[in-house]
Image: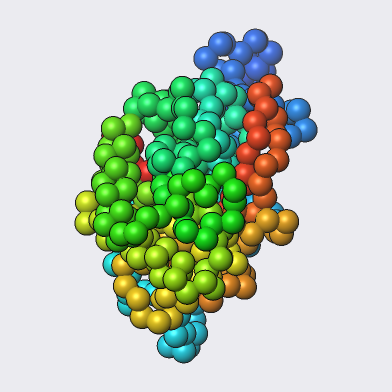
Amino acid sequence: MHRTRHMHRRKLVVGLVLFLTALTALPAPAWAEPVRHGPGPSGDAHAGPLSGLGLPDLDLSDAVFDEPATAAAQAGASDDPKSLLPALSGPRTFRGLAFDTCTAPSLETMRRWRSSKYGAVGVYYGGRARACPHQPWLSHRWMRGVEQLGWRVLPVYVGSQSPCVGAGPKKGYRIGRHPWSQGVREARDAVRRAAAIGIRAGSPLYLDMEAYRYRQTKCARTTLSFVRGWDRQVRGEGYVPGFYSSADSGVRHMRAAARAGVRDLPSVIWFARWHTRPRLAREPVLRRSAWSTQRRIHQYAGNVKERHGGRSLVIDRNLVHAPVARIG
């Protein structure tokens, strides 16, 4: 009797194995096909660690991100602006690679560039000194569109320039006799234009101040007054004031102002130093404790041509660990 039961169980097991083997030979139904995320660098389909979020994998092998300053370094830093700057109260931040280009690309181009290593884009949305004032694509609809595609946005405002600006094309847009009030007026314009294209309060607005001769005392005083007026007004209207300039001019000037205890300085620094590796923590002009965590962008290359998804753009390249726009 026990042997009969054993033989019966054995037949059942063999039958089940044969049945499962037959199932595996059948073609998989359509719903069982693996999801593919497009060709990777080698041309093979791949799904990277960010694919579930609709974001590309970022190749940051050469990037040097900011590192938190040690307590000892902070204690001994005379140029640490943290005591002079309001805390960044929960801004939306981005850490990775970004590009900026003179004219905001079409949404179709932005869609195709999702195959690139970049995850954020700088847009020149306002300011009388913009090199490309005509922006046919830039609108509230465009901002929502790039947001839906997974991009993060760095809004750049190119307002009046330093009286001792070096670039010839910018000399026609120099700061006037009343720099503080002019900075306040242009800050109001920056906020108004930002809101018009859906950039909400809590977002950064980056003031673009091209390289200038900051060692000229009168010029430096005028420029700093303009920047401080702009910063205070932007901050007062609920946005985060950022500052873009050459590392060896405007950024060096802001660092000197911070060391001197000047208030109403930018909350975020975007420094241009080309022909070098992308790095945030090792900029010679800035101590690690100055504009440290989530407050830095390094523009490490400019005017380079890249092609992704069949579309070419002339861009600047940036390494970012800083606030980005909130789009509403």
Side of 43 relative to 291 (left or right): right
Question: Quadrant where the N terminus lies?
Answer: top right
Q: Residue at x 41, y 47 (%)?
A: 159
Side of 228 relative to 33 (left or right): left
Give the color scheme: rainbow, by chain, secondary structure or one colour: rainbow
Q: Residue at x 41, y 37 (%)?
A: 125
Q: Position of residue 45 (x, y in %)?
A: 69, 27
Question: Quadrant where the C terminus lies?
Answer: top left
Q: Position of residue 15 (x, y in %)?
A: 62, 17
Task: Classify 279 as above or below 40.
Answer: below
Q: Is residue 94 visible?
A: no
Task: Classify 284 as above or below 235.
Answer: below
Q: Position of residue 92 (x, y in %)?
A: 36, 49
Q: Is residue 213 visible?
A: yes
Q: Residue at x 60, y 67 (%)?
A: 248
Q: Position of residue 302 (x, y in %)?
A: 66, 46
Residue 143 placement: quadrant: top left
Side of 187 relative to 295 (left or right): left
292 or 260: nearer the viewer: 260
Numbered circles on residues, count: 0
303 or 215: nearer the viewer: 215
Q: Residue at x 54, y 57 (%)?
A: 165
Residue 183 placement: quadrant: bottom left
55 or 152: nearer the viewer: 152
Q: Residue furthest front?
A: 177
